[in-house]
Amino acid sequence: MTQPTPIRRVALTRPFRVLDAYCCIGGATAGYRLAFPGCHITGVDIQDQPDYCGDAFHQGDAIGRTYPRLITPTRAALETTGRPYVMENVAGSEVRKDIRLCGEMFGLGVLMHRYFELGGWTAPQPTHPRHRGRVRGWRHGEYHDGPYVAAYGKGGGKATVEEIRAAKAIDWSTDHLRLREALPPAYTEWIGRAYLAARATTSLGVAA
């Protein structure tokens, strides 16, 4: 696995506690575990997630009530804590586009572009390498081959369970739907290490 930009390892001075809201099976959790060894991670999801890979899981509404659009109220809830946070979503969402990550940055077999909003800290945008080809599968009646699998939907050459597991580097679940929804752990491993680097820089009195 390659890193899109050099992010040095920074030792933790005390145990970290991480909340992974809307956690699904814990793709983000697994990445933060790699970035923050020894941390305690709690997942929250409106649906039961028997394959969740963190330390604790709570089924329920992450922000305490139902909203038709979750990003704005989630941001407001996170900001009230006064702690650094990260929100992730797709293009076209209301998430602020501070960082864009792609599977090609990490040598993965899936593209899955995702945007990250960084609350209370900053990090430089890593270089987005050129894609090596197309996503494999049928498009408008024509079959295309390529180095990436389509980790969404079913049929039409979409990825199987084993293909998604391999493409995203997720080995603890065999649930096709949850695997499709899960974030590749490489993304949040990079985000976590970027946060530690920013924190170390800020502690020295230099703006991150």
Image: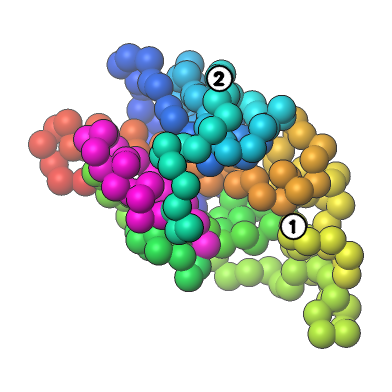
Residue that appears at 63% across and 69% down: 131
Residue 147, compared with residue 77, is above or below; it is: below
89 inside magenta stretch:
yes
- Please tell me which of labels 1 and 2 falls first in the chain: 2
Looking at the image, is 62 positioned above or below residue 142? above
> Residue 85 vs residue 150: left or right?
left
Give, as a single range, the part of the protein colored magenta. 71-90
Element carrying mark 1:
loop
Residue for point 48% across, 70% down: 92
What amino acid is at disc 1? Ala
Q: Give the x, y percent position of residue 122.
A: 28, 49
Q: Point out the frontmost of discs 1 and 2.
A: 2
Does the rendering let one see residue 91?
yes
Could you tell me how far apart the alpha carbons at marks 1 and 2 are, in whole angstroms?
27 Å
| Residue annotated with mark 2 | 56
In terms of depth relative to the viewer, which is nearer, 48 or 116? 48
Circle on res. 151: 1
